Image (spheres, rainbow, N blue to C red):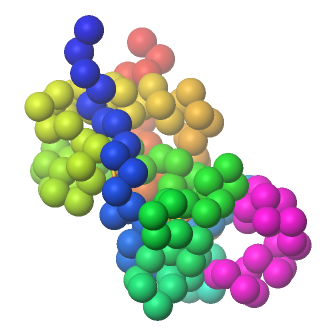
Amino acid sequence: MSAAAFECRRCGHCCHGVGGIIMTARDRERLAEHLGISVAELVERYAERVGGKIRLLAGDDGYCVFFRQGVGCGVHPGRPDICRAWPFFRGNLVDQASWEMIQSDCPGVDGSAGHEAFVREGVDYLYANGLMHEPGEETPHALVLPDELKRRNRS
Ligand code: SF4
Ligand code: SF4
């Protein structure tokens, strides 16, 4: 049996940076419920609205406001779809060069498995976890797959 094309090493690199964690309405409801607060309070305290999208804030350390050093995601059961889907983002699935580039940021991506195996595993994972999204004003483009990948999974 071949090794997984991706297996998270829990290094936390993907939780570092500003602006990448966009939340859909479903994400906001799930995360607010996890935190035991209202959606309005979630957005007020932990997010900002930029260009029609609502995204999580980063702390002074440059990590997501919910990242805990030495622990990882502090809201893991309630985390947004974009966190669940990484590294199986549209760009990394459709573009081999992007997949090659993310290998230096995400040690969980095994380059030796090959891009085809990464795509196969990724599309299976996205479907199995209900992470397929249609284009929409609030939807991160990274979560919208092109038709050829949707067809691939059905065959
Ligand atoms: S960068 Fe990759 S290996 Fe590290 S925590 Fe994120 S998904 Fe896991
Ligand atoms: S919500 Fe959790 S998994 Fe997502 S970026 Fe923040 S700390 Fe990382």
Q: Residue at x 27, y 31 (%)?
A: 5
Work out whether 122 lies above or below 137.
above
Q: Residue at x 36, y 27 (%)?
A: 121
Image location (x, y in percent) of residue 132 = 56, 40
Q: Is residue 29 magenta?
A: yes
Q: What is the span of residues highlighted in magenta in the rendered image?
A: 28-47
Main secondary structure type of the part rendered in magenta: helix
Work out whether 35 lies above or below 123.
below
Report whether residue 94 is seen.
Answer: no
In this rendering, would 45 be left or right of 70? right
Q: Is residue 126 magenta?
A: no
Work out whether 108 lies above or below 153.
below
In this rendering, would 26 be left or right of 125? right
Which residue occupies the foreground of this view, 74 or 2? 74
Image location (x, y in percent) of residue 81 = 58, 52
Q: Residue at x 76, y 77 (%)?
A: 42
Residue 76 in which image quadrant = bottom right
Image location (x, y in percent) of residue 155 = 42, 12
Image location (x, y in percent) of residue 18 = 43, 80
Residue that protrudes farthest toward the front in the picture: 70
Q: Residue at x 23, y 59 (%)?
A: 105
Residue that protrudes farthest toward the bottom in the picture: 60
